[in-house]
Amino acid sequence: MEETAAAAAPVPNAATPEPAGDAPSGDASADPAAVGDDEHDSKEVVLRRYFLQEWELVSAILRRIVAAGGDAEPADVHKIRSIMDKYQEEGQLLEPYLENIVLPLMSLVRSKTMELGTGTDELLDIIKPLCIIIYTLVTVCGYKSVIKFFPHQVSDLELGVALLEKCHTISSVTALRQESTGEMETKCVVLLWLYILVLIPFDISTVDTSIATADSVDGAEVVPLVTRILNICKDYLSSSGPMRRISGLLLARLLTRPDMAKAFSSFMEWANEMLLSVTDDFVDQFRSIGIVEALVSIFKIGNRRALYDTVSGAWNDCSVVMKTNVSARSPLLRKFLVKLAQRIALISLPPRSPSWRYKSISNSLGANLSSSTTGEAYSSESSEQVNIDQTDVCLLEDMDVPEIVEEIIDLLLTGLRDSDTIVRWSSAKGIGRITARLTPALSEEVISSILQLFSPGEGDGSWHGGCLALAELARRGLLLPSSFPDVIPVIIKALHYDVRRGPHSIGSHVRDAAAYVCWAFGRAYTNCDMKAVLEQLAPHLLTVACYDREVNCRRAASAAFQENVGRQGTFPHGIDIVNTTDYFALASRSNSYLNVAVSVAQYKKYLYPFADELLCNKITHWEKSLRELAAQALSLLVQYDMDYFGGHALEKLVPCTLSSDLCTRHGATLAAGEVALRLYQLGFTFSTDMQKALSGIVPAIEKARLYRGKGGEIMRSAVSRFISCISIAGISLNEKIKKSLLETLNDNLRHPNAQIQCAAVDALKHFIPTYLVSSGEKIANDIISKYLALLDDPNVAARRGAALALGILPYKFLILKWMPVMNKLCSSCTLEDKPDDPDAEARVNSVRGLISVCETLTAPFDQSSNSGDSVYAYIKDYVMRALFTALDDYAVDNRGDVGSWVREAAMDALERCTFILCRRDIAALRTAPASGHESELSVMEVNSSSSAHQLFDSGIAQDLVAGIAKQAVEKIDKIREIAIKTLQRILYHEEHLIPFIPHRELLEEIIPNSTDLEWAVPTVSYPRLVKLLQVSCYSKSVLSGLVISTGGLQESLKKASTSALVGYLEDSDINTNCEGKSREHLLSCDLLWVLQCYQKCDRVITPTLKTIEALFSKKVFLTREGYSEFYSGLVDSVGSELKGSKDFTKLCAGLSILGYISSQLDGTCTKAFTQLLTFLGHRYPKIRKAAADQVYLVLLQNDDLIPSENMDKAQELLAETCWEGDLEEARRKRSQINKMAGFSVATSLKSENQETRITDARNIVTTDENKSYSSLVDFSGY
């Protein structure tokens, strides 16, 4: 491992400080020979050279802490903890550095405790940050690695106990690790320190200074120092944190000392009392877990003779607690009870190594391989003889098993059935440990009891626990080869264990455990004993490795197979299969089914097990996607034995298509179609009976009415795919069946499920050319007429399916009625076709169907002939126009911008139509009489040729680029990326140049032929695309899309697009083509065009007003003179847009624009100010308040609007009036301001009276006068 890790790790740039006591290795990059010595250096040297690159930073922080006398900054502690956490899964990499980290920190803890004493709170404030660092290392590297570097002088024992008592009085302020202030970490570190200190080789009574002056010590009393430790640890046994486990370890080390007999008896009595009085209280639950965990540690490391007398009491407590409700609810408690029970059994049985245990020849893989090649006969005979002889000898032995052990074995066997994995796993290990102490006869009884767990009536937990137990017995050599005939069939069943439970299945953990058993077999037994077993297991292991649903099971089975191939020596094709079924290849289920399994199935030994697995289990699986994948996988195996699949497999699949089980008939239908298609592709000849059977599947399904009910939709998709497969395969059908299948597909076309529609369309694409093209024009006309009629069907699903179906009709059908078909599809593409019942999906499908029809009609024509000119002319004049209309589809429903689906399809269709027209133009130019000597046309010749006789002319080119460029600057990331990539393909088409594109050089500069740019990122795309604003033929379209982003709601998009627009205006390197006109002037003209073109279209007008407001806020259009025309047009547009508007955002943006214009010393300011004043009497209070704010700001900046003698009075009136109050009062105040400004009141009164009349009319219609305002408030978010 060291060599691999070293090779993969980066070489540090400079030599890092090495831990003390070791010579520095130097910089590996400076010494090439150092890298080459990695293979020969020790593990520690390699790790220091390559790992923990942050050691320099860590050591600097440690030096700073030591220099400060232990005063650690919280930032330093957090930094070290974040560094150490990265090594959570590779803690061994830190071990060479532990001494340099732990030793100085623990020395500081010890010295500060001795210096300050445990009576002050200052001590804890110093050592808590240090303990956080130490405990972080404990969590990463484990406590055993860390405590080796704790100070352990005898005098430290009392010091540690006093510090623990001090820590015991404080409580943690938070349970969050990142917010911890060190209370819990300090307690854990001090407990671990005492774990080392209680191992002193002297009687603890001689260390306790409280009894040092006494003349004698009564041996019947517990040493006071020990009592203090016991009392604190008993409290911690009730904790839910890590102190519970560490205090249990401390108690085990303390109470198993030879001089702790009295303390041990006292603790056992207390534990017995606590366990027998356990209640449902959560504190008692944690205390029970802590006590049992402590007892487990005691019985693990204690002396057998000292513990033997306590076995009966401990087992009684264990059995009682196991039957309580607390145990039933706590898997962790049951786990520790099972561990305690097995430790009790081991104490009760005499320690011995069973002579009957199976012993392989060598534990070395190399020795096994060499023996299998050089001494195979000797190995086989001697190994078998040794094991048999030993077994015979042991059969003569007799052993009295205590009754308590039998009860514990029963408990462990029951634990194998537990509902939690941790309990089953602990029980399995306990079975293995205890069986190693038993005689062969008793071990056979244990194995027999384990095999009973695999009976059909047992649940998945029993199967899982049984597999774990068998694996543990095999690993320890306790499962003799004589038991293989009973064990192997059970393991094979477990490898395929899968039980359906409602909408899912269970059993993956059982299959994983069964693979673990096979892995253990490979490690435990010799080649001679495993040869026959491996021949049985290998096909099943590879079946699971390739076809299991769960990735962990596939990988587990592959690992087991690899272990057996490696350990058992030669195996046919073993290495090749291991290389194919590697860890990463099995990560993807589809790759396992479609690639790995096909590669393994080339070996005949595995082909038929694979086929049986797919036929019997996988195509009937409960998961729909797995059945579909299994059908494809089955078809890929056909190549290895066509007769088997064309005979046996299809004969088995055909009856299953009518099964009452949905999963079975769905999988069988798919599999039958895929296998038939694959057989046809491989040249297999179907018998007449088989063709008849295949052709009758769909009519039989319809006759049985299997489309009804829950699985009807699933079966419809499967039937469509089946028809597609037999159509490609050319299975012979009679006329009745043809008609039946066509009706089936037409029914599926009208289904509302899009997946079923697509499957039906794909089937029709193959069914019509195979069976209906030769039937005559009447059928063709009937089919076309039917689909055209469906385009007007009230059912939206029928319209969607008909549009797709027209797109896949063959040329011989379409040529009969191509103009009605294209005309109908063109009208169906646009939103205006059905304004009362718009359906975005129908329009999308119409666009897709239209372009497919165009490609079908133009594909057969000889490009050098004049045939089909009318088709190309229709595409130019009508299809392109319909697609440009679809490109402006901005329909919205409750799903959002559904029009974006239509625009996306329209961009793709426009690109394909462009290529159709350009190919025709280039072919016409090449065959012209004047150019008979030239076979290739240059770019100049194409562009210089007259566009009057060309299909793709300059007008179409300009509209095409402008329309797609507009989509490239709008707000949806996906649409922007698609639009730019479409332009990229048009500009850099590989086959031929697309002519007549205006300003191609600029476009190629903005959109390079590169895949490196992330066009969906706004900060990447907008700075480039805004440069198109300098080109007059693109600027209006681009700006109409750009304002959607700059004035939109998404803040990040708004910021990026606005910054790009302002950057374009400020960039002096950008030159415009209009001499004498600035970029701001051109932009102002385009903005007015947008406002006029999209009048009353709030989708564009509102963001445009917000864009103009944002530009005004950045002093655009305000720093120069000459914008009077822009101001005037803007005021007129804003006035017409705000009139009668209820859009709060639109009104506020318009008021802000009027305020900016009113502030300018320009002739238009009075007109803007007049409009602004009218909003002081608006019916919405928020708008009146916003208008008043704008008027006040205007008066502060422009003194010419109101005479100076009235200015102060007007400002005071604006400031003191409650504009959100009474409407009539606000209008009276507005009239006063009008008089102060010298404006005519008649206009204001006329407007006011008109508004009053409108309001009165509305009040007649509705009695709720607050309805409109409530809708405004809801819309505005107030």
Image (cartoon, rainbow, N blue to C red):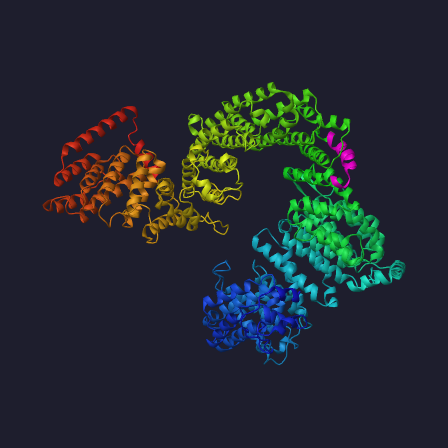
Q: Inspect the magenta stretch and tell me whether residue 171 lies in it.
A: no
Task: Indicate the position of residue 823 as horizontal and vertical percent values.
Answer: 48, 25
Q: Inspect the magenta stretch and tell me whether residue 649 lies in it.
A: yes
Q: In this view, does 426 lie to the left or right of 1231?
A: right
In the foreground, 1087 or 919: 919
Q: For residue 997, what is the image quadrant?
A: top left
Q: In this view, does 73 lie to the left or right of 1091?
A: right
What is the residue that sits farthest to the left in this orientation?
A: 1205
Can the viewer see residue 764? Answer: yes
What is the residue that sits farthest to the top in this orientation?
A: 778
Q: Is residue 593 left or right of residue 787?
A: right
Can the viewer see residue 415? Answer: no
Task: Indicate the position of residue 788 as horizontal and vertical percent values.
Answer: 52, 23
Q: Quadrant of the N terminus?
A: bottom right
Q: Quadrant of the C terminus?
A: top left
Q: Is residue 189 left or right of residue 181?
A: right
Task: Indicate the position of residue 124 as horizontal and vertical percent values.
Answer: 48, 70
In the foreground, 332 or 818: 818
Task: Indicate the position of residue 1087 as horizontal and vertical percent values.
Answer: 31, 41
In the foreground, 840 or 223: 840
In the foreground, 514 or 839: 839
Is the stretch drawn in magenta largely helix, strand or loop? helix
Please name the residue shown 55% across and 74% down the image.
15
In this rendering, the count of numbered labels is 0
Where 1065 sits versus 729, above or below?
Answer: below
Magenta segment? 638-654
Where 808 sits versus 325, above or below?
Answer: above
